């Protein structure tokens, strides 16, 4: 019979300890963010995929089509192409494609860009079931931002 009362006492003690922890955390402020309606502010050092930087004077991409980002990328996920047009002194950016499925977010491309034409974006909500959605035409995305 003493084992029966010992189990009741032990169960009641466990219940009291558990309820004490529950009440302690019930009075603390909520940390959870209601995701689709609220979003977290991304830290300054957050590294999303890369994006092109717009030249404030011309409104076009600052990229000078040197190809350093493409050569510096260890995973080979960047494709850059440019055209030399008549009457122009420099090449004009024609294509800048990022295959985000193979990007390791190492930052070698951003570090190697001497003209400061690419930077890390703060975009973090990338979700899809299709591989094609992660092959990003960064030049087209820059034009759509206007």
Image (tube, helix red, strand yellow):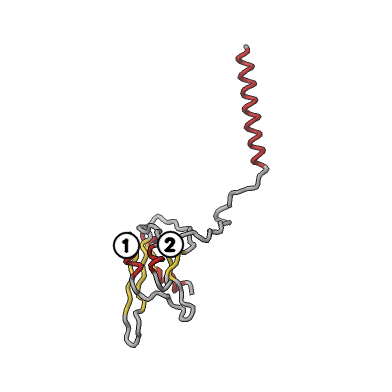
Per the image, the residue denoted by label 2 is 49
Answer few, some or many: residues within 10 Å of disc 1's Cα (few below 14, many 20 plus, some between 14 and 19): some
Residues tagged 2 and 1 counted as in contact (Cβ below 8 A): no
Q: Give how far across and how far down residue 144 sits, in percent.
A: 46, 72
Residue in view at x 49 percent, y 75 percent: 146
Question: Disc 1 on helix, strand or loop?
Answer: loop
- Point out which mark residue 67 bears: none
> Is 65 rendered above or below residue 124?
below
Q: Position of residue 77 (x, y in %)?
A: 34, 62
Q: Which of 71 and 10 is in front in this view?
A: 71
Please name the residue shown 63% across and 36% down the image: 21
Judge from the rendering whether residue 134 lies leftward or rightward of residue 24; answer left or right: left
Q: Which residue is drawn at 50% across and 60% down?
A: 45
Furthest residue toward bottom: 87
| Label 2: few (<14), some (14–19) or many (≥20) C-alpha neighbours in 10 Å | many
Q: Position of residue 105 (x, y in %)?
A: 40, 59
Which of the 4 image quarters holds residue 93? bottom left
Residue 25 is left or right of residue 117, and the answer is: right
**The N terminus - image quarter:** top right
- The tag earlier along the polypeptide, 2 or 1, is 2
Which residue, given by chain and number where applicable, does mark 1 sit on?
76
Determine the image quadrant of residue 130: bottom left
Residue at position x 45%, y 64% in the image? 120
Task: Estimate the x, y position of residue 115 in percent, counting from the top left.
Answer: 41, 73
Q: Residue furthest top?
A: 1
State the SS at label 2.
loop
């Amino acid at each position: 019979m003493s084992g029966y009362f010992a189990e009741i006492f032990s169960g009641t003690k466990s219940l009291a300890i558990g309820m004490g922890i529950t009440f302690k955390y019930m009075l603390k402020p909520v940390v959870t963010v209601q995701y689709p309606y609220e979003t977290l502010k991304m830290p300054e050092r957050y590294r999303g995929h890369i994006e092109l930087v717009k030249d404030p004077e011309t409104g076009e991409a600052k990229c000078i089509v040197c190809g350093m980002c493409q050569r510096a990328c260890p995973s080979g996920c960047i494709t850059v192409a440019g055209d030399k047009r008549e009457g122009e002194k420099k090449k004009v950016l024609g294509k800048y494609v990022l295959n985000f499925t193979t990007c390791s977010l190492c930052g070698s491309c951003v570090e190697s860009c001497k003209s400061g034409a690419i930077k890390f974006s703060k975009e973090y909500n990338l979700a899809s079931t299709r591989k094609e959605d992660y092959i990003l035409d960064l030049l087209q995305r820059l034009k759509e931002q206007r």
